[in-house]
Image (cartoon, grey):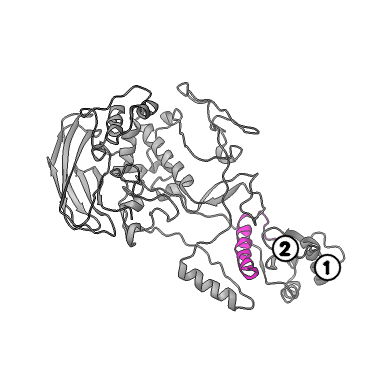
Amino acid sequence: MATLAASSCLLSCLLVLFLSSVSAVTDDDKQVYIVYMGSLSSRADYTPTSDHMSILQEVTGESSIEGRLVRSYKRSFNGFAARLSESEREKVAKMVGVVSVFPNKKLQLQTTTSWDFMGLKEGKKTKRNPTVESDTIIGVIDSGITPESLSFSDKGFNPPPKKWKGVCSGGENFTCNNIVGRDVAFIHPLPAAGLLTEDFESLLSYLESADSPHATVLKTEAIFNRPSPVIASFSSRGPNTIAVDILKPDITAPGVEILAAYSPDGEPSQHDTRHVKYSVLSGTSMSCPHVAGVAAYVKTFYPKWSPSMIQSAIMTTAWPVNATRTGIASTEFAYGAGHVDPIAASNPGLVYELDKADHIAFLCGMNYTSHVLKVISGETVTCSEEKEILPRNLNYPSMSAKLSGSGTTFTVTFNRTLTNVGTPNSAYTSKVVAGHGSKLDVKIMPSVLSFKAVNEKQSFMVTVTGSDLDPEVPSSANLIWSDGTHNVRSPIVIYTSDY
C-alpha cells in the first residue's frame, strides 16, 4: 500500500503544480525547485515543515532560511518548493528520502471544454438569443450543489422573471441569490486515475516487484474520438425495467471527469482531507446539467415549446454513436438516441409531441390504478379501452419493444405522429438504416410525409418483422425522416431479455 500511495502522490504533486500560483523565480543564480519526497511519513512525531527546514539548513549552510522555503507540501504528499542554486539542487537530489528534484514552472491550466465537444463554440459561430436567454429558468433535480461557489455567482444576473413561482428556501447556512435554489452538497474523491483491467494488473505487478517504483506523467493530448460518447459503465444503462417498451437511456451527454464546483466543507475522500473549491467529478450529476443547459438553449429559440417537443428535438438530432465496443456497451442500451448536439437540436424540422392526455393513456396501458393516476395527474381518471394505449405506442422519439422469446417469428407495430416545426410545404421521405443484432425488416406507412403548414401533424405506422433474435444483444435499426435539410432520426430496438 505504501508503494501505491507513493505513486499516487506523484500524480497529486503534478496536479498541485498545475494549480499552484507560485512562479519560477531567479534570484542571482537561484531558481525555484520542487523537491518531491514521496508519501508522508506515518510516524506520529514527524513534522513535514520542520524536516523541510532542516534539509534546507543542511544544504545551504544557513541558519536562517527566510526567502528560501517557498512552500511546504504536507497534505497529499511530502515535499517542498525552495530557491536553490544548481549545486544546492544537486546536493538535495542525493539526500536520503528525496525522490526527485525538478524546476518549478508556472503553467496555464488547459482543458478540453464540454461545450466545445458538444459543438457550442464561443463568439459569433454559435446562434444566440440573448433577450430570451435572460428570461429562461433552468431547473435541475440533483443531490446537491455548493451555492457559495463562484460557479453559481449571480453577478450580472437580474432577479428571476415574474413567471417564476418558486422560492429559495435553503437550510442552515445556505446562500440564496438570483441563481440558486435549495440543495445539498455531494462528495467524490480526488485524485484518481482510470485504467483498463490489464493495465492495472500490469501496474500492480510493477509496484509489488520494484524496490523503488517511479511513475512519469506525460503531457496530455486532446483528441476527438467518435467512439467516445458512450454511457460510462457506472452510469445508468438500459433496458428499462419498469416500462419495458420505452427505450432508456434517452441520450448521452458529457459526464466523465468534469471539472466542477466542489463543497469547501467536504473532503475529497477518506484519505484526502484537503478542502478545495473545484474537483474532477463523474456521473449523472455531471451529464444532467449539460442536458438541462441544452434544453434551455433550445427553449430560447422556441419559448412556447412544450418539454416533450424539446426532448424530441434533442433526441432526434443527436450524433449517431459509432459503436465499436462489444456486448451491451455497443448498443442503444448504452447511449440511447446518441450524443447530444445542441446546434442541431435548435433546428429539428419535425418533433414528436406529447400532452397530458397522452401520458394518462400510457399510464392506463401500464395498468396503473385510478388512485395512483390521481396522485400523478392531480385529477380523477378512469381508465377505459378507449383511453388506454399500448406503452410502445406512446408518441416517443424512440421505438422499443420487449418480446417474450427469441426463437419465434414476430411482428411489432408502432404508431407515431410528427409535428412540422420547420418550413411550410415540405416533404419528408423515410429511410431505414440497419443497426445491431439480428436483421429487422422495417416497413413505414406512408413512406413520405407532406406538410403544407407549420405545426401541421402527420401520422405514420412502423411495422417491424423478424425471427430468431440474437439473445445476447438487442436488435436495432434507425428510422430517418429527411427533407434534404433536416434528418429526424429515431432508434428502433427489439429485444428479449434483461441482459
Residue at left 40%, top 40%?
Answer: 294
Q: Quadrant of residue 458?
A: top left
483 vs 27, left or right, is left
Magenta region includes residue 277? no
82 vs 484, left or right, is right
* Residue hosting label 1: 57
The three-letter code of the residue at mark 2 reads Phe
* Residue hosting label 2: 80
Q: Position of residue 268 (x, y in %)?
A: 61, 52
351 vs 465, left or right, is right
Residue 106 appearing in the image: no
Q: Quadrant of residue 205?
A: bottom right
Magenta region includes residue 9? yes
The three-letter code of the residue at mark 1 reads Gln
Whether residue 342 is situated above or below residue 89 in the rendered picture: above
Residue 131 appearing in the image: yes
* Neighbourhood count class around disc 2 (C-alpha, 10 Å): few under 14, some 14–19, many 20 upward: many
The boundaries of the magenta stretch are: 1-25
